[in-house]
Image (cartoon, rainbow, N blue to C red):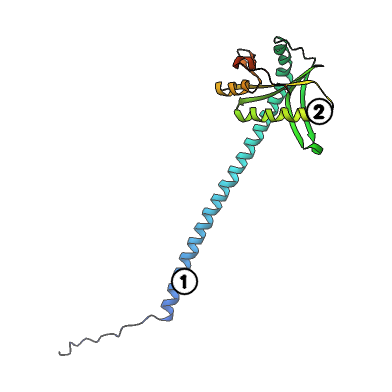
Amino acid sequence: MGDTGQTRKPARGLTFEDVWEMFQETGQKIKAMGEETDRKMRETDQIVKETARQMKETDKRVGEITNRLGDMVEHMVIPNLTVKFRELGFTFTQAGNLKITDPEHDIFTEVDALLENDDKVMAVEIKTTLRIGDIDDHLDRMEKLRFRTNLRNDRRIYLGAVAGVVIDAGVQKYALRNGLYVLKPSGETFIVTEPAAEGCVPREW
């Protein structure tokens, strides 16, 4: 084949400058990706901190509500309890609440409302929504009370009751069948249902 009169340029391989430029471009891309990742992590961290703040604020408000409910129980519910139980033949001369801290015998518990006379004591657990677990806890609490009163040579009969603003029918039956009195709202006051409503007798400790 004859000469066309054109001169071919030899193919040029990658030079150090070419490779270095590619490294620089890759480095810039990695840096940009890292900055974007850092930005997203900062945003996530901010979201986590804000969520934690909101949860802390919620806990604070719940605590305030709980304290107010405690005040209501002490100043409004307890005095009415004595009246309602008097209708059932109980005459309690003392009413209040009780907190027990007895590390020697590993007894740590609280009673929302404690009604007393010389012969009997009624321990009442009060919940906004009463659940099966609350009943089991109160039965366990009654055992602790009995154990502690035996240590103190208190031979009075202890009875248990549970109260709730919201009480499912099945939960009420469970409480009554375990020998507990049940208190629930009725209009502007509340009613006391005896274990006899389920064919049971009140449990004594």
Point out which mark residue 24 bears: 1
Counting from the top left corner in percent of width and height, residue 125 is at 69, 25
Q: Is residue 114 above or below residue 48?
A: above
Q: Nearer the viewer, residue 134 or 37?
A: 134
Counting from the top left corner in percent of width and height, residue 37 is at 51, 57
Q: Nearer the viewer, residue 146 or 37?
A: 146
Numbered marks: total: 2
Point out which mark residue 59 bears: none
Q: Is residue 18 visible?
A: yes
Amino acid type at image mark 2: Asn
**Which of the 4 quarters of the picture holds residue 19?**
bottom left
Counting from the top left corner in percent of width and height, residue 83 is at 72, 11
Name the quadrant of the N terminus: bottom left
Q: Nearer the viewer, residue 28 or 101?
A: 101
Compare marks 2 and 1 and give the one earlier in the sequence: 1
* Residue drawn 57% across the image and 48% down it: 46
* Residue drawn 19% across the image and 88% down it: 5
Q: Residue furthest right?
A: 153
Task: Give the SS element for disc 1.
Answer: helix
Distance from Cα at disc 2 to Cα at disc 1: 83 Å
**Residue at the disc numbered 2:** 150
Task: Give the SS element for disc 2.
Answer: helix
Q: Is residue 8 above or below residue 117?
A: below
